[in-house]
Amino acid sequence: MADVKASAPRAPDEWEIREDMRTLIRAKEIQSDPKRLARAKAMARKELENLKKVTGATEAVAADKK
């Protein structure tokens, strides 16, 4: 196995900062639209169930039904 050296933390590139900014803008847009937010949460619950099937997880997860 190759020896992996710890690298010093790097400063985020400008493209990464811009992408983070766009992500925050999109999150606010979704949160301000109740129907869109509900659809996104429903999709997240569905994906969580799929992941539980793949991993064999049986731990109960509280679902946000709002």
Image: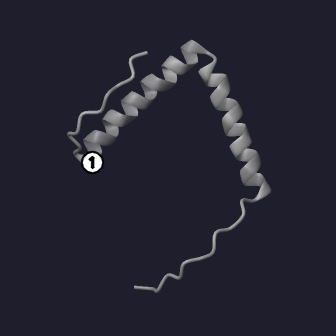
Name the one closer to the observer, 1 or 61: 61
Please tell me whether mark 1 sits on a helix, a strand or a loop: helix
51 vs 33, nearest the viewer? 33
Q: Quadrant of residue 65?
A: top left
Q: Is residue 57 left or right of residue 47?
A: left
Q: Position of residue 5 (x, y in %)?
A: 53, 82
- Residue at coordinates 64% horizontally, 69% vertically from top-left? 9
Q: The N terminus lies in which quarter of the figure?
A: bottom left
Q: Relative to 43, is 8 on the left or the right?
A: right
Residue tagged 1: 55
User: Can you say whether 13 is above or below 31 in the image?
Assistant: below
Give neighbour class at mark 1: few <14, some 14-19, many 20+ (Cα, 10 Å).
Answer: few
Q: 12 above or below 61? A: below
- Specify the color scheme: one colour
| Residue 18, percent from left and from top | 76, 46
Dot 1 amino acid type: Thr
Q: Position of residue 4 (x, y in %)?
A: 49, 81
Identify the image quadrant of residue 28.
top right
Q: Measuring 60% from the left and 22% from the top, which residue is drawn there?
A: 31
